[in-house]
Image (cartoon, rainbow, N blue to C red):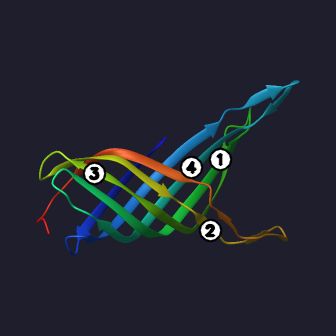
Amino acid sequence: MGWQASAGFNLTHHLGIVGDFAGQYGSIPSTTVAGVTEPSLSLSTYQFLFGPQFSFRKPRVTPFFHALFGGSKLGTGLTLTGVPATVGVSSTGFGMGLGGGLDINISDRLALRVPQFDWTPRHFAGTTVAGVTVPGSWSTGEIRFGIGVVLKAGEQR
């Protein structure tokens, strides 16, 4: 579950620049097996991406695709039973959003985005903790799916 917001500026009829911001959240509840309680785990990711978007404007629909680049932040939190605080770590690395979607135009100023799909690979650099080096890695298995309302402002190009 999460949210997504973007803002764009059209340079030409087909080419625009987009800033895309999103957050996704999830959790794994604690479990008890054979008297041993495993801690609960919370997960969050945020993307802040920018880049070109190519649109093919038609009277009723506007298909588009984009290649967005920027940052991605991954956070985890561990809650132990009987401990009042949550222990958490986060890391920010390089992120991408490669994909597109379809806007169904309702009026000159309003459209429905149904849907938008993005492949969102990200890379986090390596680090050394307590003398142990953890190498950097790519995470490439994430697909982001979104639907929503598009508010159009400004002059049509």
Q: Residue furthest right?
A: 34
Q: Which mark is residue 103?
A: 3
Measured from the top left, where is residue 40 in percent x and y? 69, 37
Q: Report the side of 154 relative to 127 (left or right).
A: left
How much space separates mark 1 and mark 2, taking CA atoms? 20 Å
Q: Which residue is mark 1?
A: 77
**Element under label 2?**
strand
Residue at point 72% right, 72% down?
126
- What's the CA distance linking mark 3 and mark 2? 30 Å
x, y percentage for residue 84? 67, 37
In the displayed structure, 133 sits above or below 120; it is below
Residue assigned mark 4: 44
Q: Nearer the viewer, mark 4 or mark 3?
A: 3
Q: Secondary structure at mark 3?
A: strand
69 vs 102, nearest the viewer:
102
Q: Which residue, as the protein is rendered here, is positioned at the far top?
A: 34
Q: Indicate the secondary structure of the residue bearing disc 4.
A: strand
Kindly report which numbered mark, 3 or 2, lies closer to the viewer in this rendering. 3
Residue 123: mark: 2
**Marks 1 and 3, how far apart at CA:** 36 Å
